[in-house]
Amino acid sequence: MTIESPDGPPLPGTGAISSAQCDALFAAVLRHDSIDLDAPPPRQIALDCTQQQLARCFQLSMQLWRDGIDQRSFASVLANAYATARLSESEQVFFKHVRAKFKHLRATYAVCDQRHRYPRPFHWLISLMGYLQDALKNGRDAPARRFALLLRCLWSDIPLRFVTRTVAALRPSTTASFRDFAIQEMHFVRDVLARPGVTGKEFHDARKVISRQVAHYDNLTILYPSADHREVSRYCNTLNGLMGSLHDELVAGTAAGVTNYRSDRFAIPEPIRQRLTALVACYPPPA
């Protein structure tokens, strides 16, 4: 049983996505936190994606999400999380894979939609998954059961059908809109780097920008292979992994009552700062 996909108007310039392409994308999604400290900064950033290419990137991500999640199996995992506030090792892997496919589609949606924002109901579902994962990881049984129950209620045919329809209503971005969005995203990171210290929330918001880059260039690498696309993907994957490891520490510190995620400030570690600075330098400032 997979997530249903409603019929809708065809996206411009799209065609069939092969199972091999979906498999390649999923393998890339599982490498999103892979760190290669030897990855060089990109020599070139593509800001000229066509509307057809952006629509195709969304189609690939949508198909991985729609066909790659067993609805009934995930419901069983949520039921077990509610009953025991625990997941077996295999269930943890399954949960991680489901959430990864959701997050990849969310990132792709923000990049490829003309409005450059994702549907709120879809985002709320992913957020609940994140809250549940953090509660399970940190042994917080009562919140884990609460989040599992909320997710289980939403993980049924009618809510999922509604969420799927909101996701399917993509308006493919124009090249100009995509370019402006990418430049504004990096300008935000530039602004974060200029601060003497950042909160966990500000750091996480900067990491979201990098995660969207990772998703976008994974799509491009599979659909439109090139050395430049692979180079950007490799570099951003490394950044995403470094930032993700630090973010996990920040969340754990807050859960333990040692730090405050939203008010305590810290200096961005130099290995991350240097790599972010090099990436931002590849983008022009906003007009």
Image (cartoon, rainbow, N blue to C red):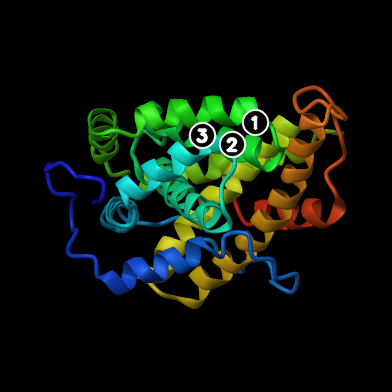
Q: Marks 1 and 3, Cα distance to the nearest angstrom?
A: 10 Å
Q: Are marks 2 and 1 in contact (CB under 8 Å)?
A: yes
Label 1 packing within 10 angstroms: few (<14), some (14-19), many (20+): some
Residue in the image at 36% along x and 46% along y: 112
Q: In the rendered image, which residue does mark 1 sit on?
A: 141
The answer to which image quadrant residue 242 occupies is bottom right
Marks 1 and 3: which is nearer the front?
Answer: 3
Q: Position of residue 40 (x, y in %)?
A: 69, 71
Q: In the rendered image, which residue does mark 3 sit on?
A: 83
Q: Position of residue 233 (x, y in %)?
A: 55, 65
Front residue (pair 279, 242): 242
Q: Marks 2 and 1, Cα distance to the nearest angstrom?
A: 5 Å
In which quadrant of the rendered image does the C terminus lie?
A: top right
Is residue 2 depicted above or below 185 in this figure?
Answer: below
Q: In the rendered image, which residue does mark 2 sit on?
A: 85
Q: Amino acid at mark 3?
A: Ala
Q: Are marks 3 and 2 in contact (CB under 8 Å)?
A: no
Residue in the image at 76% along x and 31% along y: 255
N-term mark: 1 or 3? 3
Residue 174 lies left or right of residue 79; in this view the side is left
Residue 272 lies left or right of residue 283; in this view the side is right
**Which secondary structure lies at badge 3?**
helix
